[in-house]
Amino acid sequence: MQLSLSGNFPKISPSWSSRLACLFVPSIDTLNQNNIDPSLVAKALAALPYWENGENHLLFNMIPGTAPDFSTVLDVNTDRALIAGAGFDTWTYRSGFDLSIPFFSPNQVKMSQIEASEPRKYLLISSQLNMYPYHVRILQEISFNHPDVLTLQKCPQKTENQVTSKNPEKDPKNEDIRCSIPHGNEFRYPEILTKGTFCLVIRGVRLAQPNLMEALASNCIPVIVANNIVLPFDDVIDWSLASISIRETDLHSIHSVLQAVSPDKVSELQKQGHWLYRKYFSSIRKIVHTSLDILNDRVFPHLARTYLHWNVPMYEKTTRNPLFLPLIAPKSQGFTAVILTYDRIDSLFTLVQKLAVVPALQKILIIWNNQKKSPPHPTMFPKITKPLKLIQTKANKLSNRFYPYEEIETEAILTIDDDILMLTIDELQFGYEVWREFPDRIVGFPSRTHVWDNSTGKWKYESEWTNEISMVLTGAAFHHK
């Protein structure tokens, strides 16, 4: 039998060639499109003995496209082959099929020999070449106003005798010297990256940039400013644990955003980035092995590695507080909506339709609390694109909304009553985003307060809308699983 990875789900089809392999990696070099003739490569691929329109073939492409278009995907007719490529954007990446790999840099080998210095002199280092002029102008202005931001570009052409070097043991001709703007000071690259807390990775003429790996290698936290980039191994790696993402339109505010990152958060991001780099990106061998591990999980989903396996370091000889609140979802990001209902069918269906279009929603659980009446048949529910599960309880209890149902695969839970229809989609999404910042608290919408009543000498529960809030009701609230 031969395994075919067509689409998101593997299918089994008979083939005598399966005695040799279930996945083929052609010997034709497609790693750098600058070094190949796309038309000749396409003909060579089609002539392979087991090509069969590319099914079950894996092509590695680290540098796609050529000037002046710099496509984000290999400009070769690859038929149905899987592409393990660097530089995918959300328009060209076939989720669950292709693999997004890193743009490996020879400078990574140099960085492994360099120890990072502490404390780091610069808040942000921008070292990327071939940026758009508009971005360069913004960074130049930021660097001028903030000395802790270092923006580097190519130095003006100099003769050999004019090149300065503080280390005479090194040959200046073999060094990458970059100059700061607007001041023109010279710095050795990539060594300078060890002096920065954050390193900029921004959209350029090529979407994928080698400086992402160079930043990780120097333990400099990547700041991703590329709206629709697909980061390496994005299917399994949670990059929010090791990097900062900023929208391209917000580049002008990057300094204030990074200044607001706490020292504890910086330490967490650095530790996670260091671990990810050593585990997945420090060599071509590790990149290839990680790619094959991801494919193996797709082929055998019942044996697939969990989110925790891919994203949580297993440090030796460490202890954990038994009351520790895990900040990483066991399987899925986003939130699970748990709707407690009795028999209000119309409002329930309306709420389901509204929740289904909230971007962060992963699943809806309907807790049917009426033992005297059967719940609606599944065919009666609105047609939605998110999973929906109906659970019938054995007793009518309000606390059924807090039961840790095994269907819940997210950290975040939105417990909501079936008649809460006034909240908008944006408000629900915003509530989830706020909860992500305070996962140890209840974040919700029905607010109340308690005040001391001097006349009775007792606390008074107040439901009137005031500027003071001391509690949140669980009729529409996010909380931790």
Image (cartoon, rainbow, N blue to C red):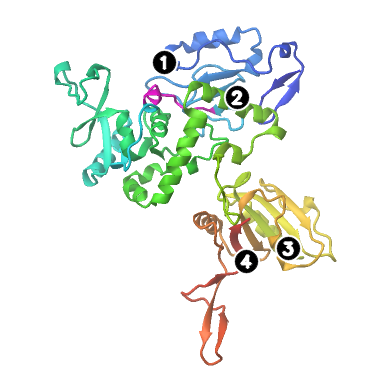
Dot 2, how many residues are within 10 Å of its Cα: few (below 14), some (14-19), or many (20+)? some
Query: Residues at badges 3 and 2 in contact (C-beta under 8 Å)?
Result: no
- The image position of residue 72, as x and y in percent, is 46, 26
- Disc ID at residue 247: none
Whether residue 237 is visible here, answered yes or no, is yes
Q: Nearer the viewer, mark 1 or mark 3?
A: 3
- Quadrant where the C terminus sits is bottom right
Judged from the image, the secondary structure of the residue bearing numbered disc 3 is helix
Q: Compared with residue 76, is residue 420 higher up or lower down, i.e. above or below?
A: below
Q: Horizontal placement of 82 versus 74: left or right?
A: right
* Residue that numbered label 3 is attached to: 400
| Quadrant location of the N terminus in the rendered image | top right
**Mark 1 in CB contact with mark 3 (< 8 angstroms):** no
State how far apart marks 4 and 1 are (Cα).
58 Å
Q: Of the residues under marks 2 and 1, which one precedes in the sequence?
A: 1
- The three-letter amino acid code for the residue at tag 3 is Asn
Furthest toward the front, the residue is 317
Disc nearer the start of the sequence (3/2): 2
Residue at x 56%, y 83% (from the top left corner): 459
**Residue holding disc 2:** 292
The residue at which mark 4 appears reads as 474
Distance from disc 2 to disc 1, alpha carbons, whole Å, reads: 25 Å
Question: Residue beneath label 1, please?
Answer: 34
